């Protein structure tokens, strides 16, 4: 290691020039590259075994001892606390893929790791990283072009395609046995919220609310046309069912606000005490009157509701719910076409939302409020059920992926087959194409093609098939023009994945390549890592400055 701080740069007067703060570390050239490459490969290695339907799950325990069981790449990497800056970049790949398309997060990290591993082989042969980066960028563009060419346009109104896509995404998860039933729910939900504008679809994924409750079986998971709040009606005397609901949405407490400063009120007689309480009472009653005055029969409040206010609301026959999440308030406003009012004085009849039915129902041991038949029908809730908390947690994550792929394919109706078929096909075409390029760039493109083959290879490996034999068979079959031939994981053989209904959105495959290439190229261009030291803690134990980026050198 070489520290800038220690470089013997001196002024003519012989005074050393210090550039970095004391304790900062700099790693340069080959060493910096090697460390980064190592860290990136390790991250890819962590998620690799969870790729595909036979992928294993990870059990993650956080600092508080909470356990998460998942095989979702993005979730695994979100939960583990990585230190190394290059490892963090790998985590970013999964995040960006998750944000853009929602699925393919494991594949993106596996591909990113493979790209870096292959680049390392070239670096060891003295190919300069910038040449590799240029080659990778070209290869990435070409691969996307190839995928576009082989992709199949589908009719977005054709439900069977949407079901196949949703099912493929869920087959790789804990919920695989219920994939068929859940795919139905997912496609129902997305179809309900999709908006068609001039023949193209637009989906706002926030219109689909996912609520989960442990208990029952996963098959009980269902879609509700409306919004479900995991809250109960606040007062026993209130109605539990209101038809033709007129809903006041309030982001203000129905409570007497406590003063910020300490104040003392001297009360010297019981009469005074009574007057004081009466005044509070009167103020709360006035608030409730304001609500009832608008003609509302349901009130949903983001803040608290005082006991006395509850009593008056109950007397006025209003169904009230309190302490509702802000995100839910916004969803409610959109769904019922009401307005969230922050000052109770401003509430008018025009601000009320509407729904056919608001009802409190029992979900396991809890009581939840269902708002159905909303004015704006593009709001739905999926109520996830399953044996235990961990199961519903993972089911929720899997549903997220499935909802996203269904949205992806609705918005961009083109598909490719799964099981590593498109990756293997693109790899073969890239290798052919590379022969027309100049010497060193050709090497980089070839390495890119090899990296793409990691996807079918890993699927085979995770299934217990012989990876090399599988790849050879795959290449041979594809060279005869069977472009949809991939690794059929469920039957442990090389087969036509399109026929087995394993299909994925083109958008996901494109994004996997984009995210992985971007991160790999960014990482390969780094030849200098300068890590600041942590500011000294006032009275830390000796050697307490450990960790942070200081641990980097050990990677
Ligand atoms: N039945 C199947 N046979 C073979 N491969 C499959 C099957 N179902 C899904 N896959 C493949 O599994 C990969 C996705 O695995 P997954 O664990 O969901 O990771 P990711 O986070 O990348 O989506 C894709 O390449 C997909 O084509
Ligand atoms: Mg997936």
Image: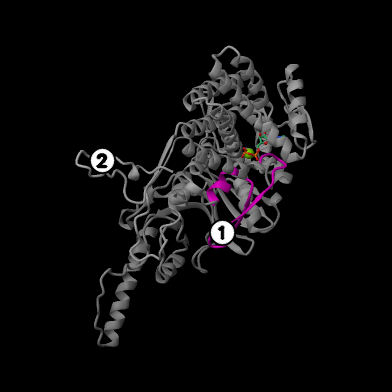
User: Magenta span has 68?
Assistant: yes
Front one among 296 and 546: 546
Vertical side of 374 occupied by 62: above or below = below
Task: Give x and y (percent) for residue 127.
Answer: 52, 25
Looking at the image, what colour scheme do you see?
Answer: one colour
The residue that mark 1 highlights is 368
Residue at 59% over, 63% down: 366
Whether the residue carrying mark 2 lies under 8 Å from ligand 1 is answered with no
The residue that mark 2 highlights is 10
Q: What is the distance, in whole Å, between disc 1 and disc 2 at their CAs? A: 72 Å
Magenta-highlighted residues: 51-79
Task: Give x and y (percent) for residue 220.
Answer: 69, 51
Quarter of image, ligand 1: top right
Task: Give x and y (percent) for residue 243.
Answer: 53, 53
Residue 377 appearing in the image: no
User: Magenta span has 371?
Assistant: no
Residue at 49% over, 23% down: 131
Mark 1 or mark 2, which has the lower sequence index? 2
Residue at 70% over, 33% down: 457
């Amino acid at each position: 290691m070489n520290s800038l701080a220690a470089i013997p740069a001196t002024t003519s007067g012989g005074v050393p020039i210090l550039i970095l703060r004391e304790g900062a570390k700099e790693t340069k050239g080959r060493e910096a590259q090697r460390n980064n490459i190592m860290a990136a490969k390790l991250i890819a290695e962590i998620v690799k075994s969870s790729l595909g339907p036979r992928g294993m799950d990870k059990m993650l325990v956080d600092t508080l001892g909470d356990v998460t069981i998942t095989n979702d790449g993005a979730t695994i990497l979100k939960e583990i606390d990585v230190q190394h800056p290059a490892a963090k970049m790998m985590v970013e790949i999964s995040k960006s893929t998750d944000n853009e398309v929602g699925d393919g997060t494991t594949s993106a990290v596996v591909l990113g790791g493979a790209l870096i591993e292959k680049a390392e082989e070239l670096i060891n042969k003295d190919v300069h990283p910038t040449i590799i980066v240029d080659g990778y960028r070209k290869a990435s563009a070409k691969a996307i072009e190839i995928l576009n060419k082989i992709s199949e346009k589908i009719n977005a109104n054709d439900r069977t395609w949407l079901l196949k896509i949703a099912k493929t995404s869920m087959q790789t998860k804990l919920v695989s046995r219920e994939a068929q039933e859940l795919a139905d729910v997912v496609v129902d939900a997305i179809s309900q919220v999709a908006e068609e504008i001039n023949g193209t679809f637009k989906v706002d994924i926030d219109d689909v609310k996912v609520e989960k409750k442990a208990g029952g079986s996963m098959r009980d998971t269902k879609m509700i046309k409306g919004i479900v709040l995991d809250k109960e009606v606040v007062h026993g005397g209130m109605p539990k069912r209101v038809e033709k609901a007129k809903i006041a949405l309030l982001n203000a407490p129905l409570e007497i606000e406590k003063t910020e400063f300490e104040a003392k009120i001297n009360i010297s007689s019981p009469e005074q005490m009574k007057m004081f309480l009466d005044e509070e009472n009167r103020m709360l009653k006035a608030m409730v009157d304001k609500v009832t005055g608008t003609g509302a029969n349901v009130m949903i409040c983001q803040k608290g509701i005082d006991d006395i206010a509850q009593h008056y609301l109950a007397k006025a026959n209003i169904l009230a719910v309190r302490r509702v999440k802000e995100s839910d308030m916004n969803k409610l406003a959109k769904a019922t076409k009401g307005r969230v009012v922050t000052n109770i004085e401003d509430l008018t009849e025009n601000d009320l939302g509407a729904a056919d039915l608001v009802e409190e129902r029992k979900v396991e041991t809890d009581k939840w409020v269902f708002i159905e038949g909303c004015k704006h029908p593009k709001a739905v809730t999926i109520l996830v059920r399953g044996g235990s908390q961990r199961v519903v947690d993972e089911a929720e994550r899997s549903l997220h992926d499935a909802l996203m792929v269904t949205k992806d394919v609705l918005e961009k109706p083109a598909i490719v087959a799964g099981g590593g078929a498109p990756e293997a096909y693109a790899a073969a075409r890239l290798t052919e194409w590379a022969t027309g390029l100049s010497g060193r760039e050709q090497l980089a493109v070839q390495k890119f093609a090899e990296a793409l083959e990691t996807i079918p290879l890993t699927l085979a490996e995770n299934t217990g098939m012989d990876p090399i034999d599988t790849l050879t068979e795959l290449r041979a079959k594809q060279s005869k023009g069977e472009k949809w031939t991939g690794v059929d994981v469920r039957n442990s053989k090389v087969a036509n994945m399109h026929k087995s209904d394993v299909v994925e959105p083109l958008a996901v495959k494109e994004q996997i390549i984009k995210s992985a290439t971007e991160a790999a190229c960014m990482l390969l261009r780094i030849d200098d890592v300068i890590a600041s030291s942590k500011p000294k803690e006032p009275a830390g134990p000796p050697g307490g400055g450990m960790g942070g980026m200081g641990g980097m050198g050990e990677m």
